[in-house]
Amino acid sequence: MELFPNPGFGWLNGWILIVLFFAVYGIILLTFLKKSSARLFDRTGQRKNQGLRRVSAVVLMLIWLFLVCVTPLKIGEVVFVIGMILFTLGLAGFVSALITFRNTPLDQPVTRGLYKISRHPQQVAVSFAFLGMSLASGSWTATAFMVLGFFGIHRKILKEEEACLRQYGEPYEEYMERIPRYFVFF
């Protein structure tokens, strides 16, 4: 791992993992019905005027995206193997969570599949995948930006839970009491 790996444009850079992640995401989204897709991206009930926080989170993620895209993968090194394991687990978890989300009736909160161990398995899985990309590129800087970006996403998740409480009421409140927000004990 390096603080600032030598950037450059090449075939074996982190952009390959980013393209793979978003290609799989796009293919899964094509299987969503219009109403399920609208539910996935619904921001009703969440404050829209978060201004500086939203801009900060976007800037952090854009910097992370750039760093990963221009950083060569550390193929053959231990960080690459660890990164690829995290990336693969994250991508598989994300696909699983999306499919469960898609298959849940619109009038019910999602509580099956990975949602039995985390209230937000999509975000947890994406975080694992993005952390894996950062590690596979061997960049401490990219890893730091990804972690900072996750803290920005945490605030969005809190607002999402408030919206779910308003929409689903008592069943979602009971679900919140049984299932940790992120994973196992968080």
Image (tube, helix red, strand yellow):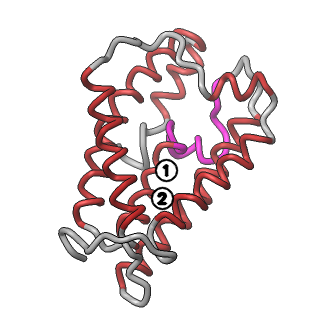
| On screen, residue 98 above or below 167 | below
The quarter of the displayed image where residue 107 is located: top right
At mark 2, the secondary structure is helix
Q: Distance between the residues labelled 1 and 2?
A: 5 Å
Residue sitting at x 42%, y 65%: 132
Q: Where is residue 52 in the image (x, y as percent from the top left)?
A: 25, 22
Q: What residue type is labelled 1?
A: Val
| Most foreground residue, 48 or 69 | 69
* Magenta stretch contains residue 112: yes
Q: Mark 2 points at which residue?
A: 129
Residue sitting at x 51%, y 36%: 119
| Most foreground residue, 38 or 55 | 55
Q: Where is residue 150 in the image (x, y as percent from the top left)?
A: 34, 43
Q: Which mark is residue 161?
A: none
User: Which image quarter holds the C terminus?
Assistant: top left
| Most foreground residue, 118 or 72 | 72
| Most foreground residue, 44 or 141 | 141
**Which residue lies most toward the left here?**
3
The quarter of the displayed image where residue 88 is located: bottom right
**Which residue lies most toward the bottom here?**
76
* Magenta stretch contains residue 73: no
Q: Given contact means CB atoms under 8 Å apart, are the residues at marks 1 and 2 in contact? A: yes
In the picture, measured across the screen, residue 158 lies left or right of residue 175, that is: left
Q: Name the residue under label 1.
A: 126
Q: Crowdedness of circle 1 by 10 Å Cα count: few (<14), some, many (20+)?
A: many
Residue sitting at x 61%, y 61%: 20
Residue span colored magenta: 109-122
In the picture, measured across the screen, residue 60 lies left or right of residue 121, that is: left
The quarter of the displayed image where residue 137 is located: bottom left
